Every structure is written in C-alpha cells, then in structure tokens.
Amino acid sequence: MSKKLKPLQKKINSIYKKSNSKPCNHSGGNTIKEFPCHTQATERIVKGVMEAAAAVCGASKMDRFIRNRLKSRNLIPVFNTKHDYRPL
C-alpha cells in the first residue's frame, strides 16, 4: 500500500531529495544542516500563513493575525489521555 502525498509534500520531497546531501553555506561561514521540512507541523504553519494572507492585508497585520491565532491556541487545554478529560 503506497502512502499518498499532498501536492505540497511532493514538491518539498523532491526539493529535499535533490539537496539532501548538501549542507547550506551562508556568507558568515556557518554551516546549517539540512532537515526534513515536510512534517505535519510545517503544513500547519503554512496553512496558518495562507489563512492570514487571505484574511488581512499588509505584513504587520498578517504578523499580528498569526501571533494572535497562536496565542489563542495556547489557551486551549491539552489532554494527554482520555482520563485527563473531564467535561463540564
């Protein structure tokens, strides 16, 4: 059974495979190791940025929109097990 990839994952996978063995060299002489960026967390951030771009105009407003969205998510409680969850 083959795992179906989303279009964004396919594109990132192909880019990552092409540059997998090459570290990024910047002008400062520092070397940054490559890491896989096709994770669920990355897709969630990309989705958030795209929602912000559709909702507001301007870089500063978009930044505030994203920061407020992340701040509100931190207010929601996280339950590790079903036993921890107790409805009101």
Image (cartoon, rainbow, N blue to C red):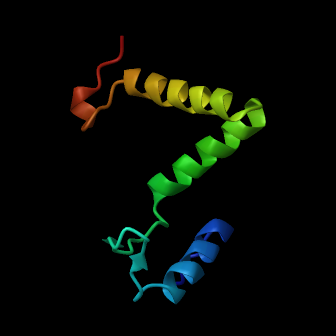
Which residue occupies 35% across, 17% down?
A: 87
Which residue occupies 50% across, 79% down?
A: 16
What x and y, as percent, mark residue 34?
39, 75
What x and y, as percent, mark residue 25?
41, 77
Which residue occupies 61% across, 27% down?
A: 65
For the residue pair 28 and 86, the one nearer the viewer reads as 28
Q: Quadrant of residue 13?
A: bottom right
Q: Quadrant of the C terminus?
A: top left
**In the image: residue 75, left or right of residue 63:** left
- Quick check: 38 above or below 80? below
For the residue pair 19 and 50, the one nearer the viewer reads as 19
- Quick check: 73 above or below 47? above
For the residue pair 5 and 62, the one nearer the viewer reads as 62
**In the image: residue 40, left or right of residue 84:** right
Q: Quadrant of residue 73?
A: top left
What x and y, as percent, mark residue 46?
59, 51
